[in-house]
Amino acid sequence: MKAEIISIGTELLLGHVVNTNSAFLSRELAALGVEVYHHVTVGDNPERLVDAIKQAEQRVDLIVLSGGLGPTEDDITKKTLANYLDVDLILHEETENKIITYHKNSDFNMPENNQLQALIFADSRPLTNDTGLAVGMMLTQNNRHYALLPGPPDELEPMVENYLKEEIVKHILDEQVLVSRVMRFFGLTEAQLAEKIQDIVVNQSNPTVAVYANDGEITVRITAKAENEEQGNEAIDEIEKDIMEILPDYFFGYGDKRLADVIKDMLNERSLTITAAESLTGGAFLSDLTSDLSAGSILEGGLITYSADKKNKVLKVTKETINKFGVVSPECAIEMAEKSRAMFDADIGVGLTGVAGPSSLKDQIPGTVYIGIAYKDKQSFSKHFHFGYKRNRNRRLAVQNALELVRRVLKDMPIENTIFYGEDKK
């Protein structure tokens, strides 16, 4: 099965909008064993769109078109393809009712052209839009398949995940079910992780294994096509076992849970509390831990202390530590963790200090970070990191690595290259 992706929109050609849809679609189709041979982008021009479709028909079995399903004059995709394929456009009542209800609930007058979003090809299979108004569709004609998807990524991605993939599996690939499992990892780059499981990725056609990076966390999605769900899960179990033999220490969970969510679950399960004193991260660590209603059970408070003066006067980091080692040091990170833990009577204290960038701080280059961990009845320690020169990336990675250190402490896992409080330091 070969596929081509055609993205429609003059704004894409002008560079006003970055085309993330094509990359997403390529990954999702590859996970099904569908090979994407071409990416094509055309503007809002019917003649050029027809030319692109004709070329795609000469080379692939599945043509996926994204964009141009809206209600405005430049949304040309449906009308152009309907004329080219000589198919009628009919009203999809479910989508029409959704559009009418949306405007009533929003106290908006519904423009007549909004109804265009509810039109589908006769004999096509509609694809529900969970997050928007324009319905998608799948049409098979002359042994060739056409999938039409909305342009906004927050509409396209759920439609692909929840509906298009199932359509492809059942109606094109002649399989009964599609089973997926998402594994989450942290502590390696995308390239490092992909290299470690390269043999597994390369040698698998069903299940397929795909690796994605997102904000420091790595996702491995295993997808199986099978006659039933049980067979699909059995096939996935085998691949997961192989992956876990290679990457046991980096795995932190399944599904859509972030690292912060996993930490919150672990703290709640153990009835433990946590706090933090943050410098370069400016509250981002505590913000990650307070993103849902369970935060109150694990956290009573924390501190943001940027200046050396406030680290001393508010957090009570000693002047001796600041003068002798500096505020960006393992010693300061440890004291920040210990003093915050004592101040809020928490089980775990975290100290984050460093140079976010882009400028250096005294003799410390941008991206230098020290994270201190103080855990009751255990020896406090600090770990040194250097991330790079991008300020917000450094801040984000500092938060993620602090969460990972907490996870490893809670699971009693080894912490490599740590500097322990009280030891001689270079």
Image (spheres, grey):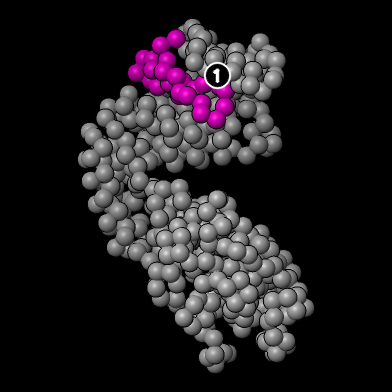
Question: Residue 38: where, in percent of width, then height?
Answer: 47, 34
Q: Is residue 5 visible?
A: no
Q: How many marks?
A: 1
Query: Callout 1 environment at 10 Å: few (<14), some (14 to 19), or many (20+)?
Result: some
Q: Amino acid at mark 1?
A: Lys
Residue 208, relative to residue 306: is it above or below?
Answer: above
Pick the front one: 45 or 191: 191
Image quadrant containing the C terminus: bottom right
Pick the front one: 74 or 268: 268
Q: Which residues are magenta?
A: 122-148
Mark 1, secondary structure of its residue:
helix
Does the stretch in magenta take in 416? no
Task: Tell me what residue is drawn at x 49 percent, y 15 percent.
Answer: 94
Task: Tell me what residue is drawn at x 45 percent, y 32 percent.
Answer: 160
- Residue linked to disc 1: 98
Question: Residue 152: where, in percent of width, then height?
Answer: 59, 32
Image quadrant containing the N terminus: top left
Left or right relative to 191: residue 327: right
Question: Residue 175: where, in percent of width, then height?
Answer: 27, 30
Image quadrant in which you'd find residue 195: bottom left
Left or right relative to 43: residue 210: left
